[in-house]
Image: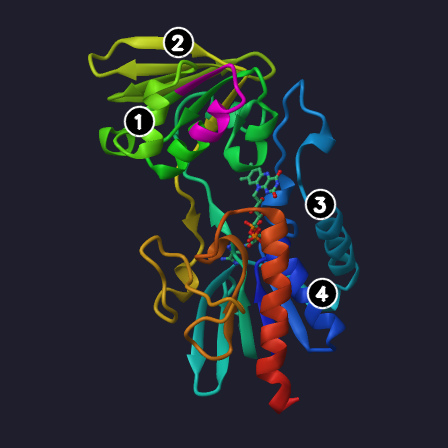
Amino acid sequence: MYDLIVIGGGPAGLTATVYAIRKRLNVLLLSKDLGGKTNYHLALPWIEDYQVIKGLEVVNKFRTELEYLDFARHIESVEKVEKNADHFKVTTKGKTTLEAKSVIIATGARQVRMDVPGEKQYTMKGLCYSALSYAPIFIDKSVIVIGEEDLALRSAGELATVAKEVTLVCANAKMMDSPLGKKLVAAKNVKVLSDCQVAEVKGDDYARTLVVKDSKGKLNEFHADGIFVEKALTPNTGMVKRLVDLDDQDRIIVDCACRTNVPGLFAAGDVTNGYAEQVLIAVGDGAKAALSAYDYLLPQL
Ligand SMILES: Cc1cc2nc3c(=O)[nH]c(=O)nc-3n(C[C@H](O)[C@H](O)[C@H](O)COP(=O)(O)OP(=O)(O)OC[C@H]3O[C@@H](n4cnc5c(N)ncnc54)[C@H](O)[C@@H]3O)c2cc1C
């Protein structure tokens, strides 16, 4: 029986695992990959690496450590986590069952795809999913934001403070009625398109053009230096949905020490209801979750 199983090898899970190793816990990291979403970077001809806060130094250090310590990691998808009396049963896709006294869920959240021609080809080549990370560098650029929820509004709002021109596509009337929505409607550098559908992404080496179908079925082309798809993320919580309290967006509810409502079960990073999806926040969460798990385990060590 492990002291701790960490599920998910992104910034949160890598950090939690290395913290647990330092605390001399008998820990296993189970993940589909190492690095998680830090394996994706937006490529644009005019972006310099230093302009974006990536937080990769610490993530890459922990990842190298885990690549070396092969006994502490196993690359496989997890299907289910159950609690039996005082311990947890973790079942992998290959139907292996592992037992642990405590578990940290760090499985992140996935982007919602548009499923239109050109999306796959241009993903991370001018077409991106994290305005939160990249908006500040769009000074004097033209940019398109796609989305019908608050996240898109917020992203368009931030981009409008620096960009030459922002086109918000698929906005719904309700969100445009909020204070930020009204500000955007009145802004000279913002164009809002409602009642429309994205039809295609086009470009050369990078995404350059968004093809949008209006309510009458007419196709219109919009050109930009960058395109952001800003739709709410889907948390990877399927494996624990009957075990732990989730919020209305299916994110795991945690307290400020990354504890869930289930004793011995912790969560960290984008999979939780914590504020903002950023690498450094996930790293901090991973550290907190591991230290909380250690406190939980201490009477049994
Ligand atoms: C395109 C893009 C660019 C970004 N750029 C930046 C940036 O420049 N700076 C910044 O601070 N943030 C950036 N972010 C946000 C940042 O990447 C995330 O906030 C961060 O990676 C979250 O870390 P995490 O460990 O919580 O989740 P993730 O990085 O998503 O890692 C989740 C891990 O869980 C694993 N997993 C999922 N399901 C299972 C399962 N069933 N079984 C086993 N393993 C599973 C995955 O394989 C992965 O290893 C960006 C995000 C995107 C999408």
Residue 194 percent coordinates (x, y)? 27, 21
Q: Which residue is mark 2?
A: 221
Residue type pointed to by label 2: Glu
The three-letter amino acid code for the residue at tag 1 is Lys
Alpha carbon of mark 3 to alpha carbon of mark 4: how far? 15 Å
Contact between marks 2 and 1 (CB within 8 A): the answer is no
User: Which of the marked residues, 4 or 2, is nearer the chain's N terminus?
Assistant: 4
Q: Label 1 vs label 3: CA separation?
A: 37 Å
Up/down of 82 relative to 53, above or below: below
Q: Which mark is residue 56?
A: 3
Residue 130 vertical placement versus 190 (above, below): below
User: Which one is in front, 20 or 174?
Assistant: 174
Name the residue beneath numbered marker 1: 182
Disc 3 beta carbon < 8 A from ligand 1?
no
Residue interval drawn in magenta? 157-167
Q: Nearer the viewer, mark 2 or mark 1?
A: 1
Distance between mark 3 and mark 2 Cα atoms: 36 Å
Query: Residue flagged by tag 3: what amino acid is it?
Result: Leu
Which quadrant of the structure image shows residue 301?
bottom right
- Residue 279: image location, x then y, percent: 61, 48
Find numbered disc 4 in the image and state the secondary structure of the residue it sits on: helix
Measure how far apart labels 4 and 2 are at the Cα level.
48 Å
- Residue 23 location in percent, x, y? 73, 76
Q: Residue at x 61, y 62 (%)?
A: 286
